[in-house]
Amino acid sequence: MKPVLLLATFLAISACKEEAQDISPVALTENAVGHYCQMDMLEHPGPKAQVHLLGFPGKPLFFSQVRDAVAYSRLPEQDGVILAIYVNDMGATGVSWEDPGKTNWIDATTARYVVGSAVEGGMGAPELVPFADLDKAAAFAATRGGTVMSLSEVPDDAVIAPVALGGDVGADDDTDYNARLKALSEKIEG
């Protein structure tokens, strides 16, 4: 084979070969906002998550709660190709619920989660609390309740189910809302 033809073949093959996308975890900064809430990630307590999608190198979707990222990955309408999910290691040295860390990311598939504990995440919903160390997860569950599980063991209803809100939400609010809606309808018709 002639050197020019060999070089052309090599270049053609190289051009077709895609480079692997960098899916390294990205540190939280003041520019990171939650995918669903579009709020500053650093203003929310509790563990966070980031989801890396094919075609968006270095630009993960951030989630204010771990449960939201897991729900995102399980929803049927999610059509992006997920390459990696990272969560804060809540057993890492120096982290707290108020400051879960900016760089202590662990692979969501290898983390251990405390499910059903008495803590709420940054958006006020029940939270999956991730740990790299199984003993630290068990210690957290012993003091705050919940069960230690792997990601594959976390039931869908722990991340996708509706969340009961505290405060004034309930039947009284429905009655008030319906009364205001009826008054508005009468005003428009009248």
Image (cartoon, rainbow, N blue to C red):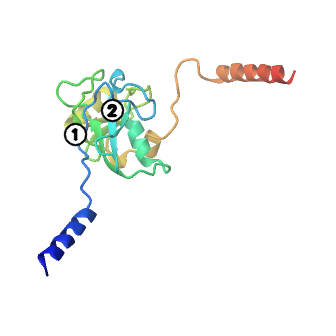
Q: Amino acid at mark 1?
A: Leu
Give x and y (percent) for residue 179: 75, 20
Q: Is residue 118 visible?
A: yes
Q: Secondary structure at mark 2?
A: loop
> Few, some or many C-alpha atoms within 10 Å of disc 2 (few <14, some 14-19, many ≥20)?
many
Which residue occupies 31% across, 39% down? 113
Which residue occupies 85% across, 24% down? 189
Quarter location, residue 119: top left
Name the residue beneath numbered marker 1. Answer: 134
Relative depth, front residue between 43 and 12: 12
Residue 48, label in figure: 2
Q: Amino acid at mark 2?
A: Lys
Q: Are marks 1 and 2 in contact (CB under 8 Å)?
A: no
The earlier-in-sequence mark between 1 and 2 is 2
Examine the rendered structure and indicate whether residue 149 appears above or below residue 8: above
Relative depth, front residue between 154 and 50: 50
Q: Secondary structure at mark 1?
A: helix
Name of the residue lying farthest toward the bottom? 1
Quadrant housing the N terminus: bottom left
Quarter location, residue 108: top left
